[in-house]
Image (cartoon, helix red, strand yellow):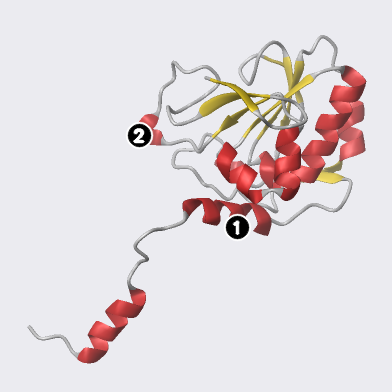
Amino acid sequence: MCLSKKFVAVQRVNKMPEKIDWDKMAVERMHSAPQPPKGMIRLSGPLEHDNIVNGDGLRAVVWTQGCPNHCKECQNPETWDYQGGFLVSTKEICERLSQFKGQAGLTFCGGEPFVQPEACKEIADWVRKNLSWNVWSFSGFTYEQIKKAGGPQWEFLKSLDAMIDGPFIIGLKDLSLRYRGSKNQRLLHLEYGTGKILKIE
């Protein structure tokens, strides 16, 4: 069967690029996410305390709303919608966290914390200064993608002591991993203030 010149031309125009820049796409998703009003954060659920599955020791957990990654078989798909959940002031979050006693630190979960980096950093800085807690975060983005994004995302990362990076990949699922769901994800111990990786698990 012969193809018309017009059909061949359409094929050439619609041809996928030979190499997709996944990191560039990730950075664009971070930068294009809608931001909450200044001094506010959008959450997917109530604050937790005495949590033992999202980091070392007893931990408070902030569940952020909104995620562009949409991992297959994500355990929290209700947190994807940027307009879901509810808005609350970062000041109120800090006040409520101060009432949680006996916590070793704070963990940001989601959703995707790095699409609300300024609000998350404000809370992270406050608990470090006023409660002497360490701060962890989960992210479906990789460390390298966040570093490439720069700006508020990188500043938030520099405020952390540890992070679990990378998307959940169902084909690499491994429930024996500490704090992680799939083998591609890493537990990164970070140098506070610089973001330098000190140790990888």
Instruction: Give the answer, above or below, for where 152 lies relative to 10.
Output: above
For label 1, the SS is helix
- x, y percent for residue 15: 32, 71
User: What number is the disc on residue 28?
Assistant: 1
Q: Is residue 140 left or right of residue 17?
A: right
* Nearer to the camera, 16 or 77: 16
* Nearer to the camera, 13 or 82: 13
Q: Nearer the viewer, mark 2 or mark 1?
A: 1
User: What number is the disc on residue 136?
Assistant: none
Seen at 34% across and 62% down, the residue is: 18
Q: Earlier in the sequence, mark 2 or mark 1?
A: 1
- x, y percent for residue 2: 10, 86
Pointers 2 and 1 in contact (CB under 8 A)?
A: no
Residue linked to disc 2 = 171
Q: Is residue 60 left or right of residue 140?
A: right
Instruction: Give the answer, above or below, for where 8 lies relative to 98.
Output: below
- x, y percent for residue 51: 68, 17
Q: Is residue 4 left or right of residue 163?
A: left
Other-residue count near label 2 (Cα within 10 Å), few / some / many at <14 / 14–19 / ≥20: few
Residue 130 in sight here: yes
Instruction: Give the answer, above or below, for where 157 lies relative to 107.
Output: below
Query: Quadrant of residue 104 in the image?
Result: top right
Seen at 92% across and 36% down, the residue is: 91
